[in-house]
């Protein structure tokens, strides 16, 4: 008896295997062991007008100036996967806005503050180190990692309610993952994205938090979902 064997080139087989695996991971198929633990490939679609109207552009990596990509502005956003941070100005300057998976039909869906009216985003980038299940950071009472400190690995809608007596934070060290810190309780006000991959996770002075930072006031903190 003779058996016929079909030989498939290794490169072809590898291509289809990798393509299938990435397809499963990006749709979050829980039937695949470990798929839910792996980060999704970042993908976002931005629109020039509110409610997902006008010209649009899809991104899977950072964009330092949206106008270089043929758009005048970003007024609505659809995040398909991953976590992103949008900036008020080009070159990742100005107000920061966390963008997690979901839809943002207009500016107040992502701003977190009605007091600071920002109706545009001019640059954005993915947050590769975001890991909701394994994020950990330490906040310090004073600059340069001095004074009282508290380690955080959860979401805290009010630092005062958890025993942090001051409305300010002097410095922070992010050991792993990424957090978004808010100026006011209840995840409101100006946002500051803290990542273990930026400044090696060391934010020794509140002026390191971002070009828009004018005060060390932090009153709520939460982990970033990827």
Image: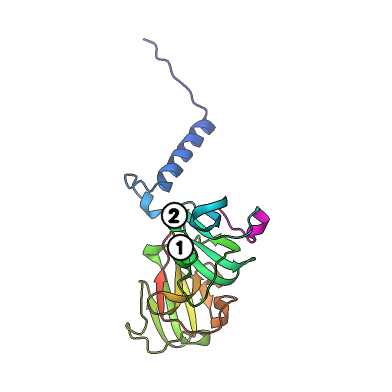
Please indicate, yes or no, whether residue 155 appears anywhere in the rendered image.
yes
Residue at the farthest top position: 1
Distance between the alpha carbons at the discs numbered 2 and 1: 8 Å
Q: Which residues are magenta?
A: 56-69
Q: How busy is the neighbourhood of tag 2: few (under 14 within 10 Å), some, or many (20 plus)?
A: some
Would residue 92 be found to the left or right of residue 76 on screen? right
Residue for badge 2:
39
Q: Position of residue 103 (x, y in %)?
A: 44, 57
Picture quadrant where residue 150 is located: bottom left
Q: Position of residue 121 (x, y in %)?
A: 57, 64
Q: In terms of secondary structure, where does tag 1 sit?
A: loop
| Residue drawn where x is 54% and y is 33% of the image | 11
Residues at circles 2 and 1 in contact by the CB criterion of under 8 Å: yes
Q: In terms of secondary structure, where does tag 2 sit?
A: loop
Q: Position of residue 210 (x, y in %)?
A: 57, 75
Q: How busy is the neighbourhood of tag 1: few (under 14 within 10 Å), some, or many (20 plus)?
A: many
**Up-down relation of residue 108 to residue 157 (above or below):** above
Q: Position of residue 95 (x, y in %)?
A: 56, 72
| Residue drawn where x is 56% and y is 83% of the image | 214
Please indicate, yes or no, whether residue 205 appears anywhere in the rendered image.
no
Residue 64 drawn in magenta: yes
Q: Quadrant of the N terminus?
A: top left
Q: Earlier in the sequence, mark 2 or mark 1?
A: 2
Judging depth in this view, the residue of 63 and 164 nearest the camera is: 63
Residue 130 got which mark?
1
């Amino acid at each position: 008896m003779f058996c016929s064997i079909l030989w498939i080139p290794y490169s072809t087989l590898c291509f289809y295997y990798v393509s299938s695996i990435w397809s499963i991971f990006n749709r979050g198929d829980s039937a695949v062991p470990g798929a839910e633990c792996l980060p999704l490939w970042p993908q976002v679609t931005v629109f020039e007008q509110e409610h997902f109207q006008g010209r649009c552009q899809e991104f899977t990596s950072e964009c330092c100036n949206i106008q270089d990509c043929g758009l005048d502005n970003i007024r609505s956003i659809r995040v398909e996967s991953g976590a992103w941070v949008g900036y008020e100005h080009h070159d990742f300057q100005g107000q920061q806005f966390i963008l997690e998976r979901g839809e943002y039909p207009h500016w107040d869906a992502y701003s977190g503050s009605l007091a600071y009216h920002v109706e545009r985003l001019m640059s954005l980038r993915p947050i590769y180190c975001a890991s909701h299940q394994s994020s950990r950071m330490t906040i310090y009472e004073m600059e340069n990692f001095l004074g009282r400190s508290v380690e955080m690995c959860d979401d805290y809608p009010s630092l005062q309610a958890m025993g942090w007596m001051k409305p300010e934070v002097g410095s922070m060290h992010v050991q792993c993952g990424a957090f978004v810190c808010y100026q006011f309780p209840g995840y409101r006000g100006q946002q500051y994205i803290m990542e273990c991959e930026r400044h090696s996770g060391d934010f020794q002075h509140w002026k390191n938090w971002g070009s828009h930072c004018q005060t060390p006031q932090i009153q709520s903190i939460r982990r970033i979902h990827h």
